[in-house]
Amino acid sequence: MSETVYDLAIIGGGINGCGIARDAAGRGLKVLLVEQDDLASATSSWSSKLIHGGLRYLEQYEFRLVREALQEREVLLKIAPHIIHPLEFILPHDQHMRPAWMVRIGLFMYDHIGGKISLPSSRTVSFPDAIYSAGLASAHKRGFFYSDAKVDDARLTVLNAIAARELGADVRVRTRLVDGKRKRDANEWCLTLHDVDSQASTTVFAKGIVNAAGPWVKHLLDDTLRVPTTSNVKLVKGSHIVVPRIHEHQHAYILQNDDKRVVFIIPYEEKFSLIGTTDIEVGAIADAAKISPAETDYLLRAVNRFVAKPVLESDIVWTYAGVRPLYDDGSDNPSEITRDYVLKVDHDHGALPLLSIFGGKITTYRRLAEHALQDLKPFYPAMKNEWTDKVRLPGGDIDSVLKTTQIRAEQYSSLPADFLRRLVMRHGSRADSILNGVATLNDLGKTFGQGANLLCEREIEFFIREEWARTAEDILWRRSKCGLHMDNAEREQASNFIADTVNRLMSKI
């Protein structure tokens, strides 16, 4: 039995939990982060991969959320330039939409509500345009340009966990909180943790808890911690499809469907377009495991209202689906439920705080962490001040992906430049740990795939040793997206090799 006492135990290794762990550890707290599966294995890898203000939220009068999100977009572009990149959007206009003057007013607000921005401002674009109407049907005569950003959501989560660990946090994956209770005599929470792999149980103690369990936030309160609450989550399923690139340029489309919802077409992994998302309320997490035929049809119909060449179901190369745990604000329409976050603190009449997170979106995770620690400040009077907006995430100490790639291409001239670029886009300056001592491709060890999407033994080992990867899915679909670029046989070979490598490396720990 461990006698370790933590200042703060954070339950949930999604973006909110990892963001709070990083922030809290940097303020001097002794932090434990517990995740029952892999980091970002749930909602935080099921997003549309965007850092954005949420243009459509203006129609729902979510002005505070949009303002905060746009301000955060600026911060995140600076602290994670390796995994977050500007993205141009085109909103094609047709007769089913709001009048053009109304769209322009909305975009003017979007340009200014967040204060000073570094990205290009919105403007009207006449079609046909060699770039900005590429792939669209000729019936569309104009569109509107605006700016946002794209992100590797799973890597953003992992990098926050790495930063927390570097600041002293204890990060445990595949570890489930199975019981927790307040020990008032010792002024501590007593937590029983279960290691999913070894089946061993451990007891630890904490002065406070953050419930960042996402879709499981209510379950953790009701069943594990036995702390009653009147707050609820609504589980809203969002599904995406991936198809071969609809156009060869770098901009995304935001399409307004005839039901007034929006669907994105986003350049994805160079060769593909990501299309999503749906909004369907579900009763259980298991109900959102896979995209349904109806959702597939919905996304295809929405896209085919705008594109010149119809996208067929047979074109789909990959799908993913998951739930967004939104705060239950009483709305009956899943698309109108607030995407804002709500923080609830239960402090048992002045001691042993428990902070629970309801809702939220990936763009505002860092501000959510600041607000959470602000709410916990009375219980930790020695806690230091805010800091995360000024310090780059691990690997983010680079000028740009382009410049860093050029430097690495000169250093490692025998390696493919596109492979080096993708390595930098995943790891930033931390790619040097993988490349150290490499002179030829053979020095990378066993390889899978080719070109930009080459997955090598050195990187696989790095994911396992440094980033808590334990399964093929962790590596092929979250730490990298190399699985998308392999056929079934290559994925099976890579999966077998990863399993053997995990066993070999973990046996030495």
Image (spheres, helix red, strand yellow):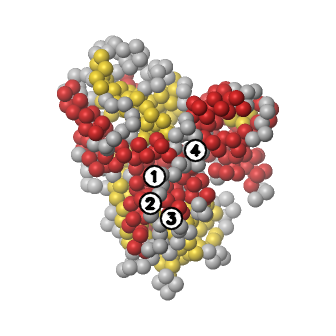
Distance in Å between CA atoms under marks 4 and 3: 21 Å
Residue at 41 percent across and 62 percent down: it is: 372
Frontmost residue, 140 versus 472 = 140
Occupied quadrant, residue 31: bottom right
- The residue indicated by pointer 2 is 386
Mark closest to the chain's N terminus, 4 or 2: 2
- The residue indicated by pointer 1 is 389
- The residue indicated by pointer 3 is 27
Distance in Å between CA atoms under marks 3 and 1: 13 Å
User: Left or right of 227: which side holds 100?
Assistant: left
Residue at 74 percent across and 55 percent down: it is: 506
Mark closest to the chain's N terminus, 4 or 3: 3
Amino acid type at mark 4: Asp
For the question of whether residue 453 can be seen, the reply is no
Quarter holding the N terminus is: bottom right
Distance in Å between CA atoms under marks 4 and 2: 20 Å
Residue at 66 percent across and 64 percent down: it is: 199
Mark closest to the chain's N terminus, 4 or 1: 1
- The residue indicated by pointer 4 is 397
Distance in Å between CA atoms under marks 2 and 3: 8 Å
